[in-house]
């Protein structure tokens, strides 16, 4: 598979604070990549940086190569042609991301008009198809509805329909299911998975829910405190976690096998961005920590093909997993 | 990974609840509608020609033949009051329509773009609000000369600022909403986001204010007419009628009372419409 988007050494500074610290990540054609991390780990801000949607004091540096061009350095006019047309984005809040006074149909045809120049009857026909595609029944009549007449799940479907109107190559989904209840969450994820295959696009799914990633993603990237900790194929990473943080995350998911036992959690709290620990940022909370961890940032290390970790203690971590199993 | 066809999640669409119109809208409409009819078809409604002198009936008090009485030239006050509705509604519309359009446009741009435009706009507003509205309008009319057209120009030159302030504030709050951000994410151009997405959300307070402003415009138009700076006699205009009547206030009360009542009733009607509209918009 070829790389659709290559992020190299992307850092984001908010004044003196570095919220994302030189991360590198590839997004391949046709894959679904899950980015996992706790709140404040820099997942969403990374997505926003790709489309130059950062709030004003934030300054990104590094490269994000998209079709041979650096997204971070594009002019406003050029990046606008990428937004929505080539890279689309959906958000956590389908309740507020739709315009309350415009009908759903109008908001879809708006996207068709802006990106494809499609208007009138042709645009309406395509809008019906799009609503069909995202699984909204009775699409023709639904076009006349307003957002407040849609449920949360349907609004997220409508958002997806709007985002997909221009047939983007990449969809950035920023916690698209967090605001929805579990059954709807499942439907939306399956919808994304189906659309990814049908439309042959790539999807980046930002979430803090490991189960979601395990269920639908091809590859996973684990972020912590503005850095990538571990990346790899979902199967490999879950079977064979090679970073102490990943292991901690996986252990803190409730499992039926450990019913009625205290839920393990990662001790401590995420570090303060103003006083980042030297070396590995997870070191102060890590059960596997050794003195070297706090000396310098751990170098990248390949565990299996495509499975990389930034943990000095990867061997010990994988050994622990095997011992438990 | 097996992917089941995702199932639709919707039940039947709930019937859109019929929103009952607020009583204020109905009452306001009931008041304004006859005024509009008078303005549209005065020749059919008015019993007499408003400008015909009848020297056999000078300053007659209200009677069956002349329900509102006659003036010092024997003109029928009822007919003049009815014909005046035409001029006064024209004033209500022309004094507000252009300021509303221009002010909304400028306010939208200033609110969306911000920066230097906004700074300049705020200075203009600061200057404009320090000068009393009526005094400023009178000053402009004094320079341009009296008459309806000049009055429209004078009011327009001042009145757009209110609409611009209103729109600016509304756009400022709308552009922070998520849907505005998602418009940017979708790669929409700034004019598209502003005029197609933000402005429709900002319109309702402007519409509400517009209704109220029509009432204010009628008051202003009559005031200027009374002062001799608006419509000119012998044109029938409520303010002009009261102006004509001021010398006979003690001897022929009907000459000023009935046009005055017309102003009050129409003003109340538009205000009720505005209030009702505001309540209705809030409920939606």
Image (spheres, rainbow, N blue to C red):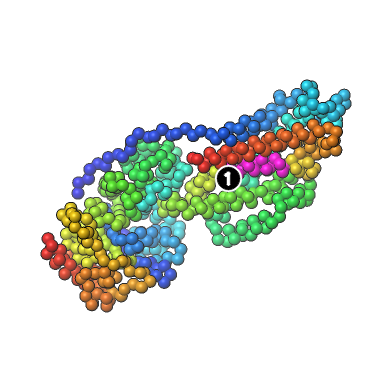
Q: Position of residue A157 (x, y in %)?
A: 34, 44
Q: Residues within 10 Å of mark 1 (few under 14, many from 20)?
A: many
Front residue of B190 and A102: A102
Nearest to the observer: residue A109 or residue A119: A109
At a point 41% along the width and 39% down the height, the residue shown is A149
Q: Is residue A67 left or right of residue A80?
A: left
Residue B146 falls in which quadrant of the image? top right
Residue at 56% from the left image edge and 52% from the top image edge:
B168
Segment colored magenta:
B207-221
Residue B82 magenta-highlighted: no
Residue under the point 61% across and 43% down: B210
> From this viewpoint, which residue is outermost toward the top?
B64
Q: Kindly state the secondary structure of the residue where label 1 is placed.
A: helix
Q: Position of residue A167 (x, y in %)?
A: 35, 48
Task: Name the residue tied to disc 1.
Answer: B206
Above or below: residue B271 compared with residue A235: above
Q: In the drawing, does residue B64 fall left or right of residue B3?
A: right
Report x, y in % for residue A155.
Answer: 37, 44
Q: Quadrant of residue B55?
A: top right
Q: Establish if B76 lies above or below A33.
A: above
Which residue appears at 66% of the width and 37% of the height? B268
| A200 on left or right of B273 | left
Q: Residue A64 at what x, y percent from top left?
A: 35, 63
Camera sees residue B81: yes
Q: Is residue A215 above or below residue B90?
A: below
Q: In front: B194, or B175?
A: B175
**Viewed as shown, does residue A164 lie left or right of B105?**
left
Please, which chain is the residue tagged with disc 1 on? B
Name the dominant secondary structure of the magenta segment.
helix
């Amino acid at each position: 598979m070829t790389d659709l988007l290559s992020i190299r050494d992307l850092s984001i500074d908010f004044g003196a604070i570095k919220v994302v610290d030189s991360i590198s990540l590839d997004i391949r054609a046709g894959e679904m990549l899950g980015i996992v991390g706790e709140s404040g780990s820099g997942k969403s801000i990374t997505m926003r940086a790709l489309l130059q949607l950062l709030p004003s004091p934030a300054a990104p540096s590094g490269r994000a190569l998209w079709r041979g061009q650096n997204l971070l350095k594009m002019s406003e006019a050029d990046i606008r042609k990428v937004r929505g047309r080539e890279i689309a984005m959906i958000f956590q809040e389908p309740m507020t991301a739709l315009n309350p006074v415009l009908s759903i149909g109008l908001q879809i045809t708006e996207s068709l008009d802006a990106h494809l120049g499609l208007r009138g009857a042709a645009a309406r026909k395509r809008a019906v198809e799009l609503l069909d595609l995202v699984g909204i029944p009775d699409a023709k009549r639904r076009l006349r509805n307003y957002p407040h007449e849609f449920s949360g799940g349907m609004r997220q479907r409508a958002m997806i329909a709007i985002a997909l109107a221009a047939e983007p190559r990449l969809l950035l989904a920023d916690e698209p299911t967090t605001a929805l209840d579990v059954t709807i969450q499942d439907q939306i994820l399956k919808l994304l998975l189906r659309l990814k295959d049908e439309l042959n696009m790539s999807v980046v799914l930002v979430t803090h829910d490991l189960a979601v990633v395990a269920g639908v993603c091809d590859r996973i990237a684990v972020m912590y405190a503005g850095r990538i900790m571990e990346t790899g194929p979902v199967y490999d990473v879950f079977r064979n976690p090679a970073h102490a943080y990943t292991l901690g995350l996986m252990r803190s998911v409730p499992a039926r096998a450990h019913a009625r036992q205290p839920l393990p959690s990662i001790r401590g709290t995420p570090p303060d961005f103003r006083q980042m620990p030297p070396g590995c940022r997870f070191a102060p909370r890590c059960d596997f920590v050794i003195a070297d961890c706090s000396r310098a940032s751990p170098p990248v290390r390949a565990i299996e093909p495509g499975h990389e970790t930034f943990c000095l203690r990867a061997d010990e971590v994988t050994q622990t997993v095997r011992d438990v199993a | 990974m097996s992917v089941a066809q995702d199932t639709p999640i919707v039940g039947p669409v709930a019937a859109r609840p019929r929103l009952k119109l607020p009583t204020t809208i109905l009452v306001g409409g009931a008041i304004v509608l006859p005024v509009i009819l008078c303005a549209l078809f005065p020749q059919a409604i008015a019993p007499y020609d408003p400008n015909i002198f009848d020297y056999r009936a000078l300053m007659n008090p209200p009677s069956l033949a002349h329900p509102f009485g006659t003036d010092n030239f024997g003109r029928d006050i009822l007919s003049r009051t009815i014909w005046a509705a035409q001029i006064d509604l024209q004033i209500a519309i022309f004094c507000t329509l252009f300021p509303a359009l221009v002010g909304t446009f400028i306010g939208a741009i200033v609110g969306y773009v911000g920066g230097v435009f906004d700074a300049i706009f705020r200075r203009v507003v600061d200057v404009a609000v320090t000068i009393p509205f009526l005094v400023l309008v009178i000053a402009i009319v004094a320079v341009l000369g009296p008459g309806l057209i000049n009055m429209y120009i004078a009011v327009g030159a001042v009145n757009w600022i209110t609409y611009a302030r209103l729109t600016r504030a509304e756009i400022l709050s709308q552009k922070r909403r998520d849907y505005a951000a998602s418009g940017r994410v979708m790669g929409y151009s700034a004019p598209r986001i502003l005029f197609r997405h933000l402005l429709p959300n900002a319109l309702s307070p402007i519409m509400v204010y517009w209704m109220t402003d029509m009432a204010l415009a009628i008051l202003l138009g009559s005031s200027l007419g009374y002062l001799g700076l608006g419509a000119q006699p012998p044109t029938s205009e409520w303010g002009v009628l009261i102006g004509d009547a001021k010398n006979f206030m003690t001897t022929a009360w009907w000459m000023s009372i009935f046009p005055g009542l017309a102003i009050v009733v129409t003003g109340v009607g538009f205000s009720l419409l505005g209030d009702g509209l505001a309540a209705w918009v809030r409920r939606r």
